[in-house]
């Protein structure tokens, strides 16, 4: 019984912590819907904002291709191209 109560308490605390995360607002532009629909499925969109000062357009393209290839993200080729163009245009250093 104690184990169940401890698990429930931990779940409630974790839910409260997640609920307090601020919503990430990326720059508007063509392809944003593809970024939000695909990238956010596996990781927070704040990765884009955090990495934007460091990544060039070529590095963004490599990142998206890495996600589609070795990482195995289910991103179509068409969506991948739209995501790359969005990142290059809005966060390409």
Image (spheres, rainbow, N blue to C red):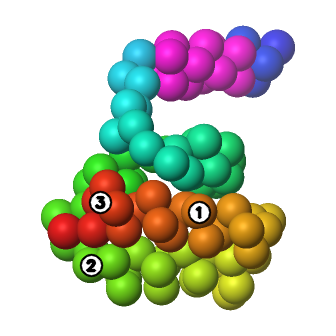
Question: Is the residue 61 above or below the residue 45 in the image?
Answer: below
Residue 62's label in the rendered image is none
The quarter of the picture where residue 22 lies is: top left
CA gap, disc 1 to disc 2? 16 Å
| In this view, the mark in front (3 or 1) | 1
Please provide the residue range marked out in magenta.
Answer: 7-19
* Crowd around label 1: few <14 · some 14–19 · many ≥20 (10 Å): some
Whether tag 1 and tag 2 are in contact, CB under 8 A, the answer is no
Per the image, the residue denoted by label 3 is 91
- Label drawn at residue 82: 1
At a point 55% along the width and 74% down the height, the residue shown is 64
Q: Give the mark nearest the N terminus, 3 or 2.
A: 2
Who is closer to the viewer here, 36 or 29?
29
Task: Tell me the CA gap for discs 3 and 1.
Answer: 14 Å
Q: Is residue 2 above or below residue 31?
A: above
Q: Is residue 8 magenta?
A: yes
The Cα atoms of the two marked residues, 3 and 2, are separated by 8 Å
The answer, for residue 73, to whether it is visible in the render is no
From where the camera sits, is residue 23 visible?
yes
Find numbered disc 1 in the image and state the secondary structure of the residue it sits on: helix
Q: Position of residue 30 (x, y in %)?
A: 51, 48
Residue at the extreme front: 30
Q: Which residue is mark 2?
A: 56
Q: In the structure shown, which secondary structural element does the residue marked by tag 2 occupy?
A: loop
Image quadrant in which the N terminus is located? top right
> Which percent across, then down, holds residue 43?
55, 51
* Image point (34%, 62%), residue name: 89
């Amino acid at each position: 019984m104690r184990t169940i109560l401890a698990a429930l308490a931990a779940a409630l605390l974790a839910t409260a912590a997640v609920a307090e995360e601020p919503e990430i607002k990326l720059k508007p532009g063509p392809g944003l819907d593809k970024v939000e629909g695909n990238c956010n499925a596996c990781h927070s969109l704040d990765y884009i904002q955090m990495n934007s000062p460091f990544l060039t357009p070529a590095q963004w393209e490599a990142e998206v291709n890495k996600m589609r290839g070795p990482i195995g993200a289910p991103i179509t080729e068409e969506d991948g191209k739209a995501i790359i163009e969005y990142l290059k245009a809005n966060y390409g250093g």
